[in-house]
Image (cartoon, grey):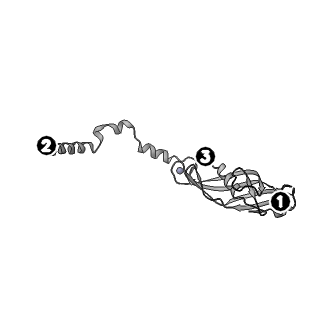
């Protein structure tokens, strides 16, 4: 939250800010991404028409599952932004940022920039390969599992079929 009451009384004057901003967990391509408190800092200034421009940086630690082994993974997200907050704009309009009552709420800006700058995949460590290895172990060479004699239940099934056939005949 930025109190811009002084800035709106002095359009063109640049004010600095340095705040912590909570970001709610976000569903990103079916994965839940959680955020620690974001650190946001920079400057803001009011325009003659009451709009407020916010120019700054954001740093936040994001948490999600490792794309390979599904263990917890984290990534530091950094973003630069420069956005205009319209005075009394439509808060339902996703294309714009808006504010009212002399207070600029930075949550929507923090959330959208954090999500935009997430890594393509979270990895618990840069060389995590465990999930790939796990998949290879689950799927041995097809020729091995297709050999009929190697199926442990094949012989049993054959025996049961023969018993059922003789039972039908009685
Ligand atoms: Zn991993």
Quarter of the image containing the N terminus? bottom right
Check contact, mark 3 vs mark 1: CB within 8 A: no
Q: Quick check: 130 left or right of 27?
A: left
Q: In the image shown, does 27 or 78 lie closer to the viewer?
A: 27
In terms of depth relative to the viewer, which is nearer, 162 or 35?
Answer: 162
Q: Secondary structure at mark 1?
A: strand
What crowding class fits label 2: few (fewer than 14 Cα within 10 Å), some (14-19), or many (20 or more)? few
Q: Quadrant of residue 152?
A: top left
Q: How far across and how far down the image is residue 57, in percent?
A: 74, 54
Task: Say which residue appears at 55% left-offset and 52% top-offset.
Answer: 31
Distance from disc 3 to disc 1, alpha carbons, whole Å, reads 35 Å
Local SS, label 2: helix
Disc 3 under 8 Å from ligand 1? The reply is: no
Pick the front one: 157 or 139: 157
The residue tagged 2 is 169
Residue under circle 1? 15
Query: Residue placed at 21% from the left, 45% from the top?
Result: 160
State if disc 3 and disc 2 touch (CB < 8 Å): no
- Pointer 1 with pointer 2, Cβ within 8 A: no
Mark 1 Cα shell of 10 Å, populated few (<14), some (14-19), many (≥20):
some
Q: Is residue 37 above or below residue 136?
A: below
Q: Earlier in the sequence, mark 3 or mark 1?
A: 1
Above or below — where is 152 with respect to 46? above
Number of numbered labels in the structure image: 3
Q: Is residue 71 left or right of residue 59?
A: left
Residue at mark 3: 120
Q: Nearer the viewer, mark 1 or mark 2?
A: 2
Q: Secondary structure at mark 3?
A: loop
């Amino acid at each position: 939250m930025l109190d811009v009451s002084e800035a709106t009384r002095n359009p063109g004057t640049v004010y600095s800010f340095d705040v912590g901003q909570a970001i709610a967990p976000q569903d990103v391509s079916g994965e839940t991404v959680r955020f620690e408190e974001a650190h946001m800092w920079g400057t803001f200034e009011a325009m003659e028409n009451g709009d407020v421009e916010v120019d700054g940086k954001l740093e936040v630690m994001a948490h999600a599952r490792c794309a390979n082994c599904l263990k917890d993974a984290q990534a530091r997200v950094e973003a630069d932004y420069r956005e205009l907050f319209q005075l009394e704009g439509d808060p339902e309009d996703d294309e714009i940022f808006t504010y009212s009552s002399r207070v600029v709420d930075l949550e929507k800006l923090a959330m959208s920039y954090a999500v935009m700058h997430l890594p393509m995949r979270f990895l618990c460590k840069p060389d995590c390969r465990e999930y790939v290895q796990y998949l290879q172990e689950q799927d041995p060479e097809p020729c091995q599992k297709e050999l009929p004699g190697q199926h442990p239940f094949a012989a049993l099934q054959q025996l049961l079929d023969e018993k059922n056939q003789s039972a039908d005949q009685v």
